[in-house]
Image (tube, grey):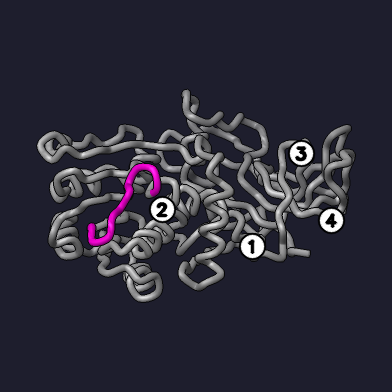
Amino acid sequence: MTENTQVLFKSRPTGWVDPSHFEVVKTPIKEPGAGEVLIRNIFMSLDPYMRGRMRDQKSYTAGFELGEVLQAGAIGEVVASNDPSLSVGDLVEGRLGWENYTVAKANEVGKVDGNVASLSHYLGVLGMPSMTAWVGLRNIGQPKAGEAVYVSAASGAVGQIAGQIAKLQGCHVAGSAGSDDKVAYIRDELGYDAAFNYKTVSSLNDGLKQVCPKGIDVYFENVGGAMLDAVLLKVNPYARIVACGMISQYNLEKPEGVKNLSTMVGNKVKMQGFIVSDHMDLKAEFMAEMSGWLADGKVKYREDITQGIENAPAAFIGMLKGENFGKQVIQISDAP
């Protein structure tokens, strides 16, 4: 193999992302330089936060550069090495390109053990999305047994884990999703106590009344906009809102306003945003607890795997529209 298929960032979207914002090209595979390795990419993660990297504005992470290969968290196999710390055949994770082969600095990737779990799990249930749920609840939500926890986008990469953690802590857990199949999954497979389809319910207020009749103590926020507004009318005193993401706003040219913030004052509500990469000092603790839950069957996880790097743009667009069912992953090549 001498040819590398790559996905370039062609133009910046101002509304919804579409195929014209990407370009798939074929280029020669590069050779690694000193201190570098050549990685055959196997699995790649697609995540909503990437939409923010498409904007030309200041953010918590650097934006994508026009004309350059897009980047994502990925797992791959070292196929050539010019650094003594990594050998051919080592499995590694890191921020790699939307491409078949990536040349990376050896000190910017880390080894993974392919015997512990499926390689794709390092991008989901043992990776960033799951740690996001774990950190958000641990540091901000702090749910207590008997409290009501509501999770929006509950069948997604983060939401499916957030709800299960809350259940393990003895909470009443409710969620919402965008199809009847997803609602059935989080209720029947993941153990959510109640759930509703936000697309078919008569109103978000009615849906929340059905699933959280005694109000909401912890809201794991993945959606924003109208959903956040509706939740603010259902919060209990001293509720905590874990502001993880607001996917309903990512493709809007003008973000929606929130009307019910005044309820936070009388109810003494705490709302806090966070970025999981600020908490990497907790990674070992997270991995130990989550891998134990996974091994004991206390946590389940669903992935939506798309084959082929050339199909990554369509999968990314579909994910932003909620068409994926579980953690969106691209399988670029076969695992060893």
**What's the residue at 47%, 67% (across, down)?**
299
Mark 4 → mark 3, Cα distance in angstroms: 15 Å
**What's the residue at 43%, 59% (across, down)?**
161
For mark 4, what is the residue? Answer: 89
- Residue 200 higher or lower than 130, as above or below: below
Q: Are marks 4 and 1 in contact (CB under 8 Å)?
A: no
Residue interval drawn in magenta = 138-147
**Tag 2's secondary structure?**
loop
Dot 2 or dot 4, earlier in sequence:
4
For mark 3, what is the residue? Answer: 104
**Badge 1: how crowded within 10 Å, few (<14), some, or many (20+)?**
some
**Badge 3: how crowded within 10 Å, few (<14), some, or many (20+)?**
many
Q: Is residue 220 left or right of residue 42?
A: left
Q: Are marks 2 and 1 in contact (CB under 8 Å)?
A: no
**Badge 4: how crowded within 10 Å, few (<14), some, or many (20+)?**
some
Type of amino acid at the residue the image marks with label 2: Lys
